[in-house]
Image: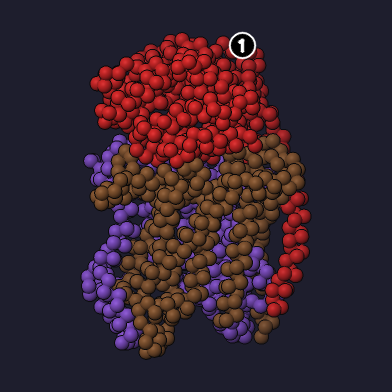
Chain colours: A brown, B purple, C red
């Protein structure tokens, strides 16, 4: 039977277009760009070969390490937040709201549709301190606290970015994870209940393990977005205050195109790509392991 | 979608599709019902829906009201002028057309190419498919900023600059990795025997893909299409880099038109433009919604 | 067990050929595009935020410069300001910059473009055309100070900067216009006691705050203070330089900028002043547009005063040296400069000054060769100040690299909120100047 599914011509026809476009427009330019890591200069001045200077410089550049730290911190916090909140939401849909969850799912999904510029403006206004007091500070004032300048320090600004990016994607992950949980056979749940599993212990021991594959997909989606975060940071804080909320993508973009150091920018991009690769291989292995199980 | 209202307590007790709830289900339900459920649901809805309302009221405000007034207060007058300005200064009509012309062809290509590749990588059996799948997975992770300079050079040298093709091509390429990967996952849920059986009837495997495989992952396709749509529709970076004339600008680039040289922003028209943008996509979303919810649900992103 | 092995084996040649390909591609790509040929259109790439220049040029093309426009039709393309530098880099890499273009967000980029032969020498071009006298000498000296002695950009704008103040608030608080920094601080103190915010400033933009640091340096150490830093003869971390940052940080520490200065954007700051919520506003003369607009200016334009940045006691600088700039300037592409482009240049030099002043009240570095009527009094006042001033200074980041400029402006808010010390602020900027 194998030969039908191993038809080389069919494989070429099916895979060919995607592979061709992907190779020409993604892989080749990426490799091309990585070639610049051993050059210095930009498109205006031309490039000169500098060997491994860029790598040495990156290793000693505190801004690079700040950006790496921020990127990782952001990716971990936001991925965990998005998937966790989404999971809670999906549990709410499946076990509490049940059939009536349809409309709620639709409505909660809504923030996904909003453009980043709009979401960022909303959060700036909510956390505003002057000239008008935003909602959050109004609440703090009502409890007798002093207004906080939320965008004045890196730690606070990070908090708001994280809240914003988690908030806007809860609906998406809620629905995505709902898919996995709702498919768990009722029999399985029932027999677990007969064994005395209830409430959270049911969720912990039965629901989570059985929805692991979909959880993995959710994590792939999420990590994919968070490691490469760019738009929402540009729109909300532009990396500030100082460079305390600059991820690698932003630092790379500035270095390449604003500072005119394309070679060095490519080196930073390589660093990001390596981080991404490690994560990719990690996820890939887990997902393949899952395949062999199934 | 049911017509049961959200906050009605009856919603909780709505009849279940599944065969009779067990004692355990009741206990679980009782455990969760203890939470002031309605409040939680109402709160969730306020948190997610309020921004829409906020966008709308902001789009009617004057700049002075927006900056100096309470950002969450109602506008003093309904200021339609903002919409007029958004449409003219923002040139929204042209930009919407450009966005549609760039996004939909790219979306179609992503879906057709991606689904076919997913099929080839998951259903077909051949050596090296793991390596190719890994190669695609790398693409999910590569930061888009990296491919800008090489692609700009190529598009320029091949004379594609000055058309929407650079956008269509780049969007297709960037959308492919995730689509291929997700499609492979969708196909994993379908037993290979289905395709083997169909080819026994004399159909070629490619025919099987279009006649059997494609429809079977239909909901998954809608899901991917939606995710990719929002990603591409909201893209700014690529649209900024590869459009070299204002005739080619997409709607997201158009939103930048409301900022002045030294940092001044016309908030009213900006919000009006955002509203035009959001309501366009919202209509599309509501139309596709049933499909998508089903897709995310039944599309079975599972092993 | 076999699968990972095979995968690894398959990857080796892929990685190897990828490496080879990378070097090959980079080698080819670095060279960049083809030769430029004579322009068929007067193409102009400008930041989309600037609507004045395209509007004026379009008007000129229909009127005074009709002949030039027939020979070489004007075609304006715009790009958002944040993306301008990237676009210039990409276009220059392909040797296909337009005939006229906005020359980049920082002078640094313009200098790079000049080095690679993309920028016309206007000193020569305008002299050849006999139009050099159409340019205000003050504008020329500002441009030369910016670009290492070269006349590299066209002064479509000429702005001076200073402190705008609310006459009513000053009168109510019984304050005279401050002449020295100490008087300014004292005035701010008096005003803040009346419950009015002394200074409106946008920390989100950053530059309105670093301008104060720069101006303080010019007043204290003299007009060459930052040239010395650029030349490496002095460092920002030197105590006399840190003193300026400390002086500005002190204003923040005392709360003179009001709350949340770091997230206040340009409009909010302007609105604070124009609605009477703030007494003073450091800003350039481009703000005249809003000052003269009764819809925006709720305090009335006759209630607005303009004072120079005050002197520093014992300082070497003079209060008469106004900080000046040419906005985000435009330049001509030397690679496609020919007689037709020259004809346009001559026509612009002759007519732009009066046209812009007449129709938009916009002050440029081109002389107003025909009489202009109906100029708003406040604009008139600034124009007089400009024509009377004999020398000017630049701004804090004018001679810095783009990177140091970004660092300076993004950290400015932290300087005034006290999140970083003046020493650390100067250290951060100096670090980027050093590499």
Q: Residues within 10 Å of mark 1 (few under 14, many from 20)?
A: few
Asked whether A277 or A151 is in front, the reply is A151
Would residue C107 be visible to someone looking at this image?
A: no
Q: Give me the residue at 40% from left, 33% from top.
A: C252
Q: Where does residue B138 sit, x and y in percent of width and height?
A: 62, 62
Q: Give me the residue at 60% from left, 31% from top.
A: C108
Asked whether C423 or B124 is in front, the reply is C423
Q: Where does residue B119 sit, x and y in percent of width and height?
A: 59, 73
User: Which of the 4 image quarters holds residue C72?
Assistant: top right
User: Which of the 4 image quarters holds residue A12?
Assistant: bottom right
Mark 1 — residue?
C130
Q: Tell me the quarter of the image containing the N terminus of chain C.
A: bottom right
Q: Give me the residue at 59% from left, 63% from top.
A: A279
Q: Where does residue B43 sit, x and y in percent of width and height?
A: 28, 61
Q: Where does residue C141 sit, x and y in percent of width and height?
A: 57, 16
Identify the chain of the residue marked 1, using the numbered disc in the image.
C
Q: Is residue C5 left or right of residue C71?
A: right
Query: Where is A54 relative to C206, above or below?
Result: below
Callout 1: SS: loop
Q: Tell me the quarter of the image containing the C terminus of chain C.
A: top right
């Amino acid at each position: 039977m194998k030969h039908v599914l191993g038809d080389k011509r069919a494989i070429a026809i099916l895979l060919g277009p995607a592979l061709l476009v992907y190779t020409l427009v993604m892989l080749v330019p990426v490799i091309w760009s990585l070639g610049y890591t051993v050059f210095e200069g930009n498109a205006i001045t031309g490039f000169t070969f500098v060997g491994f200077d860029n790598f040495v410089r990156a290793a000693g550049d505190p801004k690079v390490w700040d950006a790496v730290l921020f990127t990782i911190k952001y990716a971990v916090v936001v991925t965990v937040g998005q998937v966790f909140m989404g999971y809670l939401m999906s549990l709410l849909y499946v076990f509490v709201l049940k059939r009536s969850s349809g409309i709620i799912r639709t409505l909660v999904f809504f923030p996904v549709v909003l453009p980043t510029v709009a979401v960022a403006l909303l959060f700036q206004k909510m956390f505003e301190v002057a000239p008008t007091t935003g909602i959050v500070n109004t609440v703090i004032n009502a409890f007798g606290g002093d207004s906080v300048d939320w965008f004045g320090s890196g730690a606070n600004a990070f908090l708001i970015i994280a809240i914003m990016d988690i908030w806007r994607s809860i609906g998406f992950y809620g629905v995505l994870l709902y898919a996995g949980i709702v498919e768990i056979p009722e029999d399985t749940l029932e027999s677990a209940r007969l064994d005395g599993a209830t409430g959270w212990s049911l969720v912990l021991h039965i629901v989570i393990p059985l929805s692991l594959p979909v959880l993995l997909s959710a994590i792939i989606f999420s990590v994919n977005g968070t490691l490469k975060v760019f738009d929402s940071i540009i729109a909300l804080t532009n990396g500030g205050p100082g460079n305390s909320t600059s991820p690698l993508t932003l630092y790379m973009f500035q270095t390449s195109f604003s500072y005119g150091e394309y070679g060095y920018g490519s080196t930073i991009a390589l660093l990001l790509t390596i981080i991404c690769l490690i994560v990719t291989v990690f996820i890939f292995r887990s997902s393949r392991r899952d395949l062999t199980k199934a | 979608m049911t017509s049961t209202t959200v906050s009605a307590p009856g919603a909780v007790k709505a009849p279940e599709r599944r065969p009779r709830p067990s004692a355990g289900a009741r206990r679980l339900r009782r455990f969760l019902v203890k939470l002031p459920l309605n409040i939680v649901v109402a709160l969730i809805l306020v948190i997610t829906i309020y921004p829409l309302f906020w966008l709308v009221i902001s789009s009617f405000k004057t700049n002075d009201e927006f900056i100096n007034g309470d950002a969450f207060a109602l506008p003093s007058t309904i200021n339609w002028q903002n919409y007029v300005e958004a449409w003219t200064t923002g040139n929204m009509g042209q930009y919407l057309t450009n966005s549609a012309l760039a996004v939909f062809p790219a979306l179609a290509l992503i879906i057709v190419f991606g689904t076919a590749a997913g099929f080839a990588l998951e259903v077909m059996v051949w050596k090296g498919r793991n390596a190719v799948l890994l190669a695609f997975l790398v693409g999910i992770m590569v930061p888009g900023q990296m491919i800008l300079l090489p692609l700009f050079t190529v598009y320029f040298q091949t004379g594609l600059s000055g058309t929407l093709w650079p956008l269509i091509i780049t969007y297709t390429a960037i959308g492919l990795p995730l689509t291929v990967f997700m499609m492979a996952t969708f196909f994993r849920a379908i037993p290979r025997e289905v395709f083997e059986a169909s080819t026994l009837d004399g159909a070629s495997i490619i025919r099987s893909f279009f006649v059997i495989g494609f429809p079977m992952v239909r909901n998954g396709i809608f899901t991917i299409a939606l995710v990719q749509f929002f990603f591409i529709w909201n893209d700014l970076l690529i649209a900024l880099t590869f459009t070299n004339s204002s005739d080619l600008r997409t709607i997201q680039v158009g939103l930048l038109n409301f900022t002045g040289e030294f940092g001044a922003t016309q908030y009213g028209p900006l919000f009006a433009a955002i509203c035009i943008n959001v309501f366009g996509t919202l209509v599309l979303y509501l139309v596709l919604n049933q499909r998508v919810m089903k897709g995310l649900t039944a599309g079975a992103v599972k092993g | 067990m076999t699968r990972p092995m095979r995968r690894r084996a398959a990857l080796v040649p892929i990685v190897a050929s990828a490496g080879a390909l990378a070097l090959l591609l980079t080698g080819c790509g670095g060279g960049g595009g083809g030769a430029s040929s004579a322009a068929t259109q007067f193409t102009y790439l400008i930041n989309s935020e600037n609507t004045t220049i395209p509007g004026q040029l379009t008007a000129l093309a229909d009127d005074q410069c009709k002949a030039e426009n027939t020979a070489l039709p004007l075609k304006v393309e715009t790009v958002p300001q944040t993306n301008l530098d990237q676009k210039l880099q990409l276009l220059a890499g392909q040797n296909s910059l337009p005939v006229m273009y906005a020359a980049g967000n920082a002078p640094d980029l313009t200098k790079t473009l000049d080095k690679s032969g993309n920028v016309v020498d206007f000193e020569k071009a305008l002299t050849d055309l006999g139009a050099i006298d159409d340019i205000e000498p003050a504008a020329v000296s500002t441009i030369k100070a910016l670009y290492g002695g070269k006349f590299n950009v066209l002064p479509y704008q000429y702005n001076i900067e200073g402190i705008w103040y609310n006459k009513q608030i000053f009168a109510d608080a019984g304050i005279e216009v401050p002449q020295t920094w100490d008087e300014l601080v004292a005035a701010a103190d008096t005003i803040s006691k009346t419950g009015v915010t002394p200074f409106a400033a946008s920390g989100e933009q950053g530059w309105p705050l670093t301008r104060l640091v720069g101006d303080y340096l010019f007043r204290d150490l003299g007009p060459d203070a930052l040239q010395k830093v650029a030349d490496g003869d002095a460092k920002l971390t030197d105590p006399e330089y840190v003193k300026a940052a400390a002086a500005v940080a002190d204003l923040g520490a005392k709360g003179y900028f009001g709350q949340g200065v770091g997230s206040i954007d340009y409009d909010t700051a302007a609105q604070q002043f124009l609605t009477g919520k703030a007494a003073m506003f450091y800003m350039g003369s481009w703000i005249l547009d809003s000052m003269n607009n009764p819809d925006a200016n709720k305090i009335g334009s006759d209630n607005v005063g303009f004072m120079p940045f005050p002197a520093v006691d014992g300082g070497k600088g003079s209060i008469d040296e106004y900080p000046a700039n040419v906005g985000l300037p435009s330049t001509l592409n030397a690679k496609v400069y020919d007689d037709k482009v020259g004809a346009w240049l001559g026509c612009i030099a002759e007519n732009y000054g009066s046209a812009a002043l007449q129709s938009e009240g916009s002050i440029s570095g081109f002389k107003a060769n025909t009489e202009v009527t109906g100029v708003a009094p406040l604009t008139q006042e600034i124009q007089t100040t400009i024509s009377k001033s004999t020398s000017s200074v630049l701004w804090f980041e004018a001679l810095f690299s783009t990177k140091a400029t970004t660092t300076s402006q993004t950290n400015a808010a932290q300087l005034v909120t006290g999140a970083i010390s003046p020493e650390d602020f100067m250290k951060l900027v100096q670090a980027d100047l050093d590499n």
